[in-house]
């Protein structure tokens, strides 16, 4: 009887050992599978953009950087201008004046004088001014035909889209039509906020957030790991209160967080929340020979999505830029000293509106 019990116990121990062995083999198989799979993943070539190291900053510092840019009260500079998309193209001169020399004078709160010159011979192509409320543009050269030489006047905040539609649909008068299409879009005021950043306003609301954006650096070799990168930014959003107390976004500042904190971009919104201006600031450097204006952008790209054009402004000689001088208001009021044919966009818009409001007469034929 005792021998029988011992035999049974021995058989149970053998079965238990067998089960443990099978279980161990199962674990070994699972671990081996995971290990092999892991090795295969390691061997695959990664296409993930390089995540760049980011710096940490406070909202107070970001706001102080905006005010540092805003410390420029006035500026006079000679610049290389690069027109892209529809800039100057609608009056037939895109290929001729795509690149040009420019003289820019800006002064707070919102005054600007811009002279566009033909490279090499330095002859003025166009001059334009804005006092913050109205703009004036003189077309002095048009490639030789003389058909598009005009003196155009208008209001900075006017909407000429209806006037453009009327002119595009009209027959004849093509010279004025081309002229309006060009300069109802291209206004000197578009560049004022880019060069004279408005300071932080006490009554507005500001928020800070972060964003990462995948970018391609065309200056890096094609196979470089830094060709495609994941770059971190701080976003500083500015909100204004509407008449009913609601908040509306007015500006968004992008601060590059790689290798320091740098204001890299400014977006300006209209009342409907659409982007009016998208301004990109290039690498930083020193402007003027004096002190106090280090780490300012040496290149500015202004894009107007609604008007479908952009312009690149690059300082020809950063050390020769004049900052802080006070200019008379007459410097920003262009006069038609050339005797050009004048086009008043506001008056033409009134005429179009009056014409559209006239009652239409319907003739009914008697049966």
Image (spheres, rainbow, N blue to C red):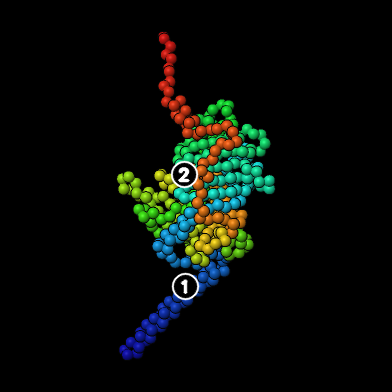
Q: Is residue 120 visible?
A: yes
Name the mark nearer the viewer: 2 or 1.
Answer: 2
* Residue 284 figure quarter: bottom right
Which residue is painted at 57% across and 64% down in the image? 226
**Image height of 255 relative to 136, above or below:** below
Q: Residue furthest right?
A: 120
**Image height of 219 relative to 94, above or below:** below
Q: Is residue 212 left or right of residue 123?
A: left
Viewer-side residue, 232 vs 88: 88
**Image height of 233 relative to 36, above or below:** above
Viewer-side residue, 203 vs 257: 203
**Tags 2 and 1 touching, CB below 8 Å:** no
Which residue is painted at 49% across and 56% down in the image? 72
Which residue is painted at 54% across and 49% down in the image? 105
Q: Position of residue 296 (x, y in %)?
A: 52, 59
Viewer-side residue, 150 vs 178: 150
Disc 2 crowd, CA 10 A, few/some/many (<14, 14-19, 20+):
some
Disc 1 crowd, CA 10 A, few/some/many (<14, 14-19, 20+):
few
- Count every numbered label the image shows and give the total: 2
Q: Position of residue 268 (x, y in %)?
A: 45, 49
Q: Position of residue 323 (x, y in %)?
A: 53, 56
Secondary structure of residue under mark 2:
loop
**Image height of 258 relative to 240, above or below:** below
Residue tagged 1: 30
The N terminus sits in image quarter = bottom left
Secondary structure of residue under mark 1:
helix
* Residue 171 figure quarter: top right
Q: Position of residue 188 (x, y in %)?
A: 52, 44
Residue tagged 2: 132
Q: Is residue 211 visible?
A: no
């Amino acid at each position: 009887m005792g021998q029988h019990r011992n035999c049974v116990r021995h058989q149970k121990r053998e079965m238990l050992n067998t089960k443990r062995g099978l279980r161990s083999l199962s674990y070994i198989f699972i671990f081996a599978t995971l290990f092999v799979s892991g090795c295969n993943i390691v061997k695959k070539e990664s296409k993930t953009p390089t995540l760049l190291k980011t710096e940490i900053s406070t909202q107070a510092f970001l706001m102080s950087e905006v005010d540092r840019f805003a410390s420029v009260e006035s500026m006079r500079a000679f610049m290389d201008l690069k027109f892209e998309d529809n800039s100057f193209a609608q009056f037939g001169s895109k290929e001729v004046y795509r690149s040009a020399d420019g003289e820019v004078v800006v002064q707070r709160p919102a005054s600007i004088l811009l002279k566009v010159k033909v490279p090499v011979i330095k002859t003025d192509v166009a001059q334009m001014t804005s006092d913050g409320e109205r703009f004036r543009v003189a077309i002095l050269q048009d490639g030789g035909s003389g058909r598009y030489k005009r003196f155009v006047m208008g209001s900075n905040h006017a909407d000429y889209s209806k006037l453009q539609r009327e002119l595009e649909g009209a027959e004849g008068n093509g010279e004025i039509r081309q002229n309006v299409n060009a300069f109802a879009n291209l206004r000197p005021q578009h560049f004022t906020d880019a060069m004279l950043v408005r300071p932080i306003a006490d009554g507005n609301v500001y928020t800070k957030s972060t964003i990462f954006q995948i970018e391609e650096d065309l200056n890096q070799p094609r196979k470089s790991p830094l060709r495609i990168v994941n770059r971190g930014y701080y976003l500083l959003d500015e909100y204004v209160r509407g008449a009913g107390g609601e908040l509306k976004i007015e500006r968004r500042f992008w601060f590059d967080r790689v290798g320091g904190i740098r204001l890299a971009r400014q977006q300006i919104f209209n009342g409907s929340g659409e982007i009016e201006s998208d301004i990109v600031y290039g690498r930083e450097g020193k402007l003027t020979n004096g002190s106090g204006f280090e780490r300012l952008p040496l290149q500015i790209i202004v894009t107007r999505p609604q008007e479908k054009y952009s312009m690149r402004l690059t300082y020809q000689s950063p050390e020769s830029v004049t900052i802080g001088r006070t200019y008379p208001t007459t410097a920003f009021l262009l006069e038609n000293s050339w005797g050009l044919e004048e086009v008043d966009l506001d008056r033409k818009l009134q005429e179009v509106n009056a014409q559209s409001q006239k009652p239409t007469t319907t003739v009914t034929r008697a049966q």
